[in-house]
């Protein structure tokens, strides 16, 4: 069941039964209006008993009777609503598993049931340009909504959706429709209007004007939980860079739970950190293979042709493709597991009511102490790396420095609403350390891979020469990164 995607950009208007559709061909850029098309549509909307989808402004419906029959899932977005469509298939009453997975982050293992049926008599007016291409559509809808267990409700609305036009056309159309007697819709969607106040209102983690330290945590952690909700469907649809963004959100959240231990119950926080580490690990296999594939494709291409012995690029790519496939399979399995669902439940509870303990003071006075603690933690790791007796030990300690720099960076980012530029500057300096040592760690991991592949080639009677060249290049990259960090470190000032 392969889905298709499209971005839905539209505006809605409430309109009385006696209002006449105005002369749409008079809109700027509109050359003509096609003959109206009449459709009888039925859409059955599904949700959990607690309206978990509607509360997040996500909709899932089974649409029949029009030109877009199928299962439709819509996600909110700043530029418009993303609609993911699946074929109808054979299922009539139950939601197909492929469709359920797109909203799993919200519904988890709760049952999806029909909650609303919308019957719509629609008249479609297509606005065309001089070449006959569709710029937008005006849907004149007479809607009857039946909520399970309630009496039907009817209304009329106009819906203008862009096709090939731009937002100016939407604005011009809005002026014309309002002049004809329409008014902005009372709700964001037909479903929202039908459900009314049945949907629970979710409280956003908004930062107060005079925040306490726990308020800073809640706002920052809430943003990361929201990022997880947004990235989960993208990972399932294999959207580029989605795994990376998902992992970053888990890392930021895990880091915040450590930084804010003085005010957030450590017992709760540490258990969540264990689960977030597990989740990031499940996602990491595919992401790391993805990054290495890009790196080695460029690295081998830079080698002189006469020094590439055998099918080097292909062998590396084949190996990493297999690692990626297995990693992605593992990641998707993790996202379908009860362990993941219970983690999501726990994160909801964390943001709804953070387990505040200890001396939770005004953030402006306390957050600097938390940042100082994270900086000192990084400084100790640097000293251990400088005192290391072997290269392997130093590599390990520099990796610890990088992880400590990330924690400091994320902590500083969370403090920006209170400390402003000082926190932004601190985050930027910590990121500088993170990036340099990221190159170093990447070189360590790449050397391990090249060594393993070289041994395989040698065992098969092949020539591992090129793998040795690449290994030497990675060693040089690691040495350069290490030296760059030790040159940079004395010049960095971590002040608030």
Image (tube, rainbow, N blue to C red):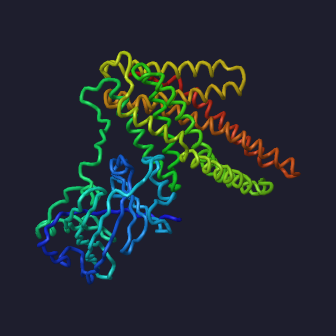
User: As drawn, which residue projects farthest toward the right?
Assistant: 461
Left or right, 87 with reference to 322: left
Q: Nearer the viewer, residue 443 or 353?
A: 353
Residue that appears at 34% across and 30% down: 421
Q: Residue 209 appears at what percent x and percent y?
A: 24, 29
Answer with the quarter of the image where residue 353 lies.
top left
Where residue 94 appears, as percent x and y from the top left, is: 46, 60
Vertical placement of 318 versus 262: above or below? below
Q: Is residue 470 left or right of residue 455?
A: left
As drawn, which residue projects farthest toward the front?
Answer: 149
Q: Residue at position x 42%, y 47% from top?
A: 106
Q: Residue at x 15, y 69 (%)?
A: 176
Report the front residue among 46 and 294. Answer: 46
Left or right, residue 434 beside residue 452 = left
- Decide if residue 392 is on the left or right side of residue 83: right
Figure check: 341 above or below 421 = below
Question: How many discs appear?
Answer: 0
Quarter of the image with the C terminus is: top left
**Front-most of 309 and 142?**
142
Q: Quadrant of residue 348?
A: top left
Image location (x, y in percent) of residue 439: 60, 38
Residue 384 locus on image (x, y percent):
62, 19
Q: Residue furthest bottom?
A: 35
Q: Is residue 373 above or below residue 77?
A: above
């Amino acid at each position: 069941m392969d889905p298709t995607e499209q971005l839905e950009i539209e505006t809605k208007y409430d309109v009385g039964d006696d209002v006449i559709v105005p002369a749409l061909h008079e809109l700027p850029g509109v050359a003509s209006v096609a003959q109206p098309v009449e459709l009888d549509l039925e859409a059955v909307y599904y949700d959990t008993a607690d309206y978990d989808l509607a509360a997040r402004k996500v909709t899932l419906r089974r649409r029949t009777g029009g030109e877009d029959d199928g299962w439709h899932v819509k996600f909110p977005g700043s530029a418009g609503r993303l609609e993911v469509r699946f074929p109808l298939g054979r299922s009539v009453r139950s939601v197909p598993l492929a469709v359920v997975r797109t909203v799993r982050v919200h519904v988890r293992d709760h049952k999806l049931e029909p909650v609303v049926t919308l019957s719509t008599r629609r008249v479609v007016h297509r606005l065309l340009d001089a070449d006959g291409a569709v710029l937008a559509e005006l849907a004149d809808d007479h809607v009857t909504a039946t909520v399970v267990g309630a009496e039907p409700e009817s209304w009329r609305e106009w819906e203008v959706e862009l096709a090939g036009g731009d937002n100016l056309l939407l604005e011009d159309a809005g002026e014309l429709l309002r002049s004809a007697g329409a008014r902005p819709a009372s709700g964001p969607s037909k479903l929202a209007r039908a459900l009314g106040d049945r949907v629970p209102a979710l409280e956003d983690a908004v930062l107060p004007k005079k925040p306490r330290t726990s308020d800073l945590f809640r706002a920052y952690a809430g943003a990361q939980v929201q990022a997880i909700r947004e990235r989960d469907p993208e990972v399932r649809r294999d959207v580029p860079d989605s795994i990376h963004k998902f992992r970053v959100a888990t890392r930021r959240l895990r880091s915040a739970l450590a930084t804010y231990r003085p005010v957030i119950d450590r017992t709760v926080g540490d258990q969540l950190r264990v689960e977030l580490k597990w989740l990031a690990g499940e996602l990491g296999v595919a992401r790391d293979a993805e990054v290495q594939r890009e790196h080695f494709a460029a690295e081998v291409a830079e080698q002189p042709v006469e020094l590439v012995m055998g099918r080097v690029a292909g062998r590396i790519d084949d190996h990493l493709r297999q690692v990626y496939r297995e990693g992605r399979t593992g990641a998707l399995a993790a996202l379908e597991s009860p362990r993941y669902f219970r983690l999501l439940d726990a994160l909801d509870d964390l943001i709804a009511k953070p387990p505040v303990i200890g001396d939770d003071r005004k953030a402006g006075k306390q957050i600097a102490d938390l940042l100082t603690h994270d900086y000192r933690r990084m400084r100790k790791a640097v000293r251990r790396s400088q005192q290391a007796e072997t290269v392997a030990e130093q590599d390990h300690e520099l990796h610890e420095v990088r992880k400590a720099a990330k924690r400091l960076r994320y902590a500083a980012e969370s403090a920006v609403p209170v400390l402003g530029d000082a926190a932004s500057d601190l985050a930027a300096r910590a990121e500088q350390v993170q990036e340099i040592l990221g190159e170093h760690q990447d070189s360590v991991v790449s050397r391990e891979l090249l060594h393993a592949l070289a041994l395989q080639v040698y065992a098969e009677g092949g020539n591992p020469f090129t793998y040795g060249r690449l290994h030497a290049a990675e060693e040089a990259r690691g040495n350069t990164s290490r030296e760059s960090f030790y040159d940079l470190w004395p010049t960095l000032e971590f002040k608030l």
